[in-house]
Amino acid sequence: MDFSVERCRRHPDCKRLLVYFDTSTYACLTRGDDGAERLDGLLRRAIDEGSAICVGSPWLDDEVALLRFGPRLDRLVQAVRSYTLGLQMKFEEELIDFELSAAAREFSGQVVQITWEEAFRDDPDDPPLQPFQAEYLNDRERFQHPPAGVEDATHDRATSESLSRAHEDLREAALSWEEVAVGNMEQQARYLLAPLEDPTSVDRANRLQGELMNEWLSGDLEMDAGSPMRKYLRLAHVVSNAKRLRERFPPVADDPVGFLESDAVRYLPMIRLFSFLLAALSVDGRRTKPRASDLHDLRHLTYGLSRCDIVTADMRSCELVRGRDLIPAGATLREAHTLGAIADAIEERLATR
């Protein structure tokens, strides 16, 4: 089997260099760490000239939100606003839907062109804010609000920690990285597309809806992260998207198994790249203790490596990615705290554009 991630690269055709920082890189910039002044000046000039821009995402918002309130949150929110100008990538569910729709078009014989609409909320060449607007918002006398719900971010971290036993089981079974990667990819694809070939998925969703309606009428229904209601909504979303694919694309409806097993699906970043990164964490991360931020880190890398030019991550994540050669051509990865190396990489890429 081919374990390349080159086809996971889905960079939009835009003029600006897309820079995707880890939260730690923003923190280094706000603290004024060694190399911060040079990197800050480089970024601000490139943003003003329209030659580069930083990119935000839900995973960055979640990490920042964990600071809740206070001076550190204020500084980080302001820094992110200054460098991204409000440019954001989409939520995971939205991005998966867009990727699967593109895969269905490819499977149906249509020409698929990667545009910014697949992953970004706005055109990177036309961000929501101008630099002077970001500066005005940063200078206003008020506290900054967390950019995401702390509850959801905390729940995701608890989920990461709960995977410790699963990682240990895989290591004890002495499975190879290739075996785990294929298994992860298979499970991810089937979770998202099982309703195409399994009519009982719709029946199960309808049954759960009835049960949850009864809970709601009794006053016991909650919407907390990880609650039955949230799980149902996720299942209902998956079922609804599969139904939409079946209705819009006759070749998918005629051959759902062929679609599920096709390269069009198996090379999607949210299926292939994420599954391979998770396998690297399970197999190659045996010398490190699982961390609460693991799932955030893997999703951060999946977003960045598939669609941005310069990506930063913590040292451990960089080692996992490089160890399995999971950096597609066109993406440059640097460690989050190495501000000088990050600036060098940005200058080099800008010089060759």
Image: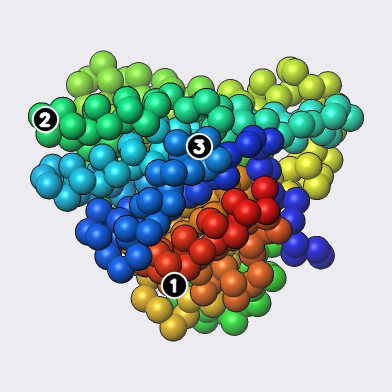
Q: Earlier in the sequence, mark 3 or mark 2?
A: 3
Position in image of residue 333 (x %, y %): 54, 63
Label 1: which secondary element = helix
Q: Secondary structure at mark 3?
A: helix
In this view, the mark in front (3 or 2): 3
Q: Work out how far the residue at label 1 is from the one at label 2, CA to CA, in angstroms.
A: 36 Å
Residue marked by disc 3: 49
Q: Nearer the viewer, mark 3 or mark 1?
A: 3
Residue for point 80% across, 63% down = 2
Quick check: 280 left or right of 207? right
- Residue identified by numbered label 2: 142
Image location (x, y in percent) of residue 315: 43, 72
Q: Residues within 10 Å of mark 2 (few under 14, many from 20)?
A: few
**The furthest residue to the right:** 109
Foreground mark, 1 or 2, reads 2
Answer above or below: position of 260 versus 220: below
Under circle 2, the secondary element is loop
> Can residue 142 be seen in this snapshot?
yes
Q: Residues within 10 Å of mark 3 (few under 14, many from 20)?
A: few
State the CA–CA distance, disc 3 to disc 2.
29 Å
Q: Position of residue 332 (x, y in %)?
A: 59, 60
Q: How far is the residue under mark 3 from the one under mark 1?
A: 34 Å
Q: Looking at the rendering, which quadrant does residue 226 occupy? A: top left
Up-down relation of residue 158 to residue 203 (above or below): below
User: The disc labelled 3 sits on which kind of residue?
Assistant: Glu
The residue that disc 1 covers is 316
* Residue found 46% across the figure and 39% down from its top: 47
